[in-house]
Image: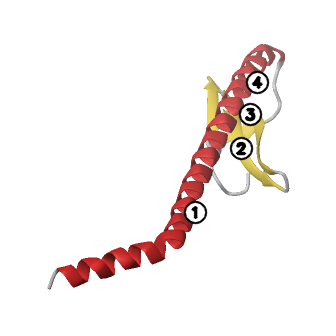
Amino acid sequence: MNGEPPASVIRDGDLKASIWENEGRNGTYFTTTFAKTYRDSNDKPRDTSVFNNSDLLRVSELARQAYGKTNELRQEMLNTQRQDHSIKDITQEAAEWEKQHSNSLSNVHAQDNTTDV
């Protein structure tokens, strides 16, 4: 919706549910749009958000599937954020450890250099 492709598209014949990833002040969230694809008089594919009676049950099934896929995408995003956060924590802890022990390491290296002669 912002120029980016949808995070996921679920299809049922000429019907589709497009799941979009969005950024807001409270972080990332997902929205879903529903469309029916048809061909115009120039044989170009077009989408409409108008559904006839026989489409409605299929749209409701797409909505159910989109709900599940949105939850799956959100869980994947949370897992990625946790992993990224863990990597940052480990990197930060390593930097702090190195800073705390830099004098000890310098002394060990200095002693190693004097014994090589």
Q: Which mark is residue 92?
A: 1
Q: Which mark is residue 8?
A: none
Mark 3: amino acid: Ala
Disc 4, SS: helix
Residue 27 versus residue 45: which sits nearer the camera? 27
Q: Where residue 54 sits in the image (x, y, percent)?
A: 78, 14
83 lies left or right of 57: left
> Mark 2 sits on what residue?
20
Q: Secondary structure at mark 2?
A: strand
Would residue 39 be visible to someone looking at this image? Answer: no
Q: Secondary structure at mark 1?
A: helix
Name the residue tied to disc 4: 63
Report the mark closest to the observer, 1 or 2. 1
Q: Residues within 10 Å of mark 3 (few under 14, many from 20)?
A: some
Query: Which residue is more in the foreground, 97 or 82?
Result: 97
Tell which circle, 3 or 4, labels the residue nearer the N-terminal end.
3
Q: Which is closer to the viewer, label 4 or label 1?
A: 1
